[in-house]
């Protein structure tokens, strides 16, 4: 029996990432964008991914769907999906079907995630046909209802071409595509960057309620700590292709262990506070070519750097109860 | 509605272009060294005609009177043109230019379109393969074939084909569109003969355009493959067949512009190709009328070729706006 013959899982879909390494081929050579990432994404939770630009958030999300594009390559590791096995072992037709069944992905640049030459409704039907849905009218009704729920004019959107929609509308249409097949895992890559504050608030609210209604496993990639604080049950902090800290949102935000997480949180200006209270992190993140291959990747910017940081890779230490942190400065407790 | 308005505006634009070209040929003939009209007039007088007779004769041939003021001549010429009167040929004495042009035009149109379709189908298919398999030997070989053939001028291709297949290894005929002994009509021997005579010229058109299609299609496919929506469709698990349709339709769009340009190139090429194969079409007509100094025929053939190019451009442009919704709404 092949993996995709399994009935659609009504059950929980957790993701277990093991020792994942991904590299990109560049003019200057091949560099790791993710290195030995091991991480559990819990079912029925909303997990927030944060980290500066280039830290590997999108790469990690793409790897989970086995969708790393050339010049990228998965060098090793496994992505074990509850009920489906190792996603990285799938190719061709089984992979295609699994994607429709398990993953709903909203693109970071979702403003261009549609075929410019076809109406939105027609592309929804293509999606339905691709995943064996016979009641295409029902699918369109469903899509329309979803669209209206997130503040779009359903009829208008379904009969529109992409170029007739605003950036914020396109992003929400991307969300409709991600949700309409009732996939088990919803991945939002900076889903609200094109939305104004009020719409963003409303959309996140609805994502949260759909998440709960359908018992989804949701991943929200964002730069916005506010979004994380509001939405996420757990937070994953990434730096230079590594997960440096992970844990329940409240504990992680109020009691960050890793100097990088501490810096990220201190860098947020508060509306009610003094702008000078926000302290930007010194320095800038390394690019792929300058990530140290040995020792802690954050040491150049760290206030607590010691000599051990230069030579020894930090190992995961448990923190926040059921979370972890990768830092030599944190004692195992 | 929008489409209709667009079509009408294009047709009006086309009509204006035809007018410009007609005016251009009018003045060109007049500005040619030795003013052919006046020369003809003088020859007739020398043959012993009275000025009135000579004037009438020239008027019939060229459609205007040589000693009228230029502006009057010009409007007279345009007026005649509106009635499809292109004057009379000099080399085919007394035969109306329109008649000659109309009897030669279909052959050119058939050749050009067959050549265009053949090269388009071959080039586009090869272009898709060259794009998708661009890192393999096959992909590279196709790209190289395209670049090489793209660099060879049309007349060289035609000369080469003519030499190879009518002289060195004479398996194809040379000359006229069909065997003159056959009865013209919708019968098998006649159509077969037409096809047989068309093979080499069509091949010349096809070979000289193939490379252009291949290279354009290849770069177009590669650029579409890099678009976000292609990856998005893949990640949504859209079936490969449907995805291929998305890519093909998007990649072929830019080719409509090339299509329009290519038609002009091919009609232009008919000058060489028909001449080399001695094939009776508009191009050959134009060349012989120039060497015979048959100015009425020359401007007639020239006008007709121009009109064919303009009309094909309008059609290509219109089709473009049918397939691309983004164009449809603008202008
Ligand atoms: N196609 C590619 N070719 C080469 N390098 C790439 C490619 N895609 C991503 N990278 C590199 O991989 C690293 C991680 O990129 P990724 O897009 O995952 O970052 P991110 O955390 O999502 O950033 P952002 O917040 O800006 O979206 C970056 O250093 C980036 O330069
Ligand atoms: Mg990203």
Image: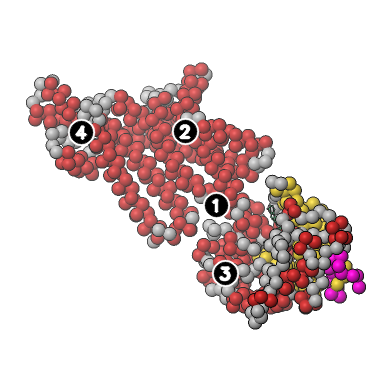
Instruction: Please name the residue shown 53% across and 42% down the image.
Output: B216
Q: Position of residue A17 (x, y in %)?
A: 81, 62
- Would you say the magenta stretch is mainly helix, strand or loop? loop
Q: Secondary structure at mark 1?
A: helix
| Same-subunit check for callouts 1 and 4 | yes
Query: Picture quarter containing residue A172?
Result: bottom right
Instruction: Please name the residue shown 33% across and 48% down the image.
Output: B14
Q: Which residue is mark 3?
A: A168
* Disc assigned to residue B62: 4
For this rendering, which residue is in front, A4 or A236? Answer: A236
Front of the two marks 2 and 3:
3
Query: Image check: A51 left or right of B125?
Result: right
* Disc assigned to residue B250: 1
Q: Are marks 1 and 2 in contact (CB under 8 Å)?
A: no
Say if the magenta span includes residue A294: no
Q: Position of residue B185 (x, y in %)?
A: 38, 33
> Is residue B97 in sight in this rendering?
no
Instruction: Please name the residue shown 79% across and 65% down the image.
Output: A302
């Amino acid at each position: 029996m092949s993996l995709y013959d399994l009935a659609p899982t009504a059950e929980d879909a957790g993701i277990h990432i093991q020792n994942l390494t991904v590299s990109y081929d560049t003019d200057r050579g091949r560099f790791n964008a993710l290195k030995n990432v091991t991480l559990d994404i819990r079912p029925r939770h909303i997990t927030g991914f944060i980290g500066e630009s280039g830290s590997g958030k999108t790469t990690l999300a793409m790897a989970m769907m086995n969708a790393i594009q050339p010049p990228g390559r998965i060098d090793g590791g496994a992505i074990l999906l509850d009920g489906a096995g190792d996603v990285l072992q799938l190719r061709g037709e089984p992979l295609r079907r699994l994607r429709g069944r398990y993953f709903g992905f909203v693109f970071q640049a979702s403003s261009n995630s549609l075929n410019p030459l076809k109406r939105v409704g027609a592309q929804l039907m293509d999606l339905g046909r691709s995943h064996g849905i016979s009641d295409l009218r029902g699918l369109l009704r469903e899509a329309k209802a979803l669209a209206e729920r997130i503040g779009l004019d359903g009829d208008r959107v379904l009969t529109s071409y992409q170029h007739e929609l605003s950036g914020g509308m396109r992003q929400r249409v991307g969300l409709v595509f991600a949700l309409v097949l009732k996939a088990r895992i919803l991945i939002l890559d900076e889903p609200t960057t094109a939305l104004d504050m009020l719409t963003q608030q409303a959309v996140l609210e609805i994502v949260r309620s759909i998440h709960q209604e359908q018992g989804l496993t949701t991943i929200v990639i964002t730069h916005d700590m506010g979004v994380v604080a509001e939405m996420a049950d757990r937070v994953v902090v990434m730096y230079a292709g590594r997960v440096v800290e992970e844990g329940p949102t409240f504990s992680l935000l109020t009691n960050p262990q890793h100097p990088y997480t501490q810096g990220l949180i201190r860098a947020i200006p508060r509306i009610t506070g003094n702008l000078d209270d926000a302290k930007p992190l010194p320095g800038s993140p390394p690019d792929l070519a300058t990530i140290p291959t040995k020792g802690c990747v954050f040491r150049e910017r760290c206030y607590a750097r010691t000599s051990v940081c230069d030579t020894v890779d930090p190992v995961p230490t448990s923190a926040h109860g059921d979370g972890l942190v990768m830092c030599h400065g944190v004692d195992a407790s | 509605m929008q489409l209709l308005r667009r079509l009408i505006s294009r047709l009006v634009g086309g009509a204006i272009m035809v007018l410009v070209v007609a005016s251009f040929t009018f003045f060109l003939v007049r500005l040619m060294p030795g003013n052919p009209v006046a020369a003809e007039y003088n020859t007739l007088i020398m043959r012993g005609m009275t000025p009135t007779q000579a004037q009438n004769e020239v008027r019939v041939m060229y459609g205007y009177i040589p000693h009228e003021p230029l502006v009057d001549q010009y409007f007279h010429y345009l007026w005649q043109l509106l009635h499809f009167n292109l004057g009379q040929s000099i080399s085919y004495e007394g035969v109306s230019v329109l008649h000659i042009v109309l009897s030669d035009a279909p052959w050119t149109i058939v050749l050009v379109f067959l050549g265009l379709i053949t090269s388009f189908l071959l080039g586009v298919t090869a272009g898709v393969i060259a794009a998708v398999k661009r890192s393999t030997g096959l992909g590279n070989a196709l790209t190289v074939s395209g670049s090489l053939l793209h660099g060879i001028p049309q007349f060289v291709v035609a000369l080469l084909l003519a030499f190879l297949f009518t002289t060195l290894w004479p398996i194809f005929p040379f000359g006229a569109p069909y065997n003159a002994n056959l009865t013209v009509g919708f019968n098998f021997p006649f159509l077969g003969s037409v096809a047989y005579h068309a093979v080499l010229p069509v091949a010349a058109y096809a070979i000289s355009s193939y490379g252009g299609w291949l290279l354009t299609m290849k770069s177009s496919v590669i650029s579409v493959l890099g678009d976000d929506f292609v990856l998005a469709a893949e990640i949504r698990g859209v079936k490969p067949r449907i995805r291929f349709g998305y890519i093909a339709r998007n990649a072929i769009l830019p080719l409509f512009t090339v299509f329009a340009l290519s038609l002009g190139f091919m009609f232009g090429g008919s000058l060489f190709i028909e001449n080399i194969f001695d094939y009776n079409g508009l191009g050959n007509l134009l060349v012989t009328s120039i060497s015979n100094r048959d100015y009425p025929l020359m401007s007639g053939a020239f006008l007709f070729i121009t009109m064919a190019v303009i009309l094909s451009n309008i059609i290509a442009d219109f089709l473009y706006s049918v397939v691309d919704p983004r164009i449809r709404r603008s202008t």
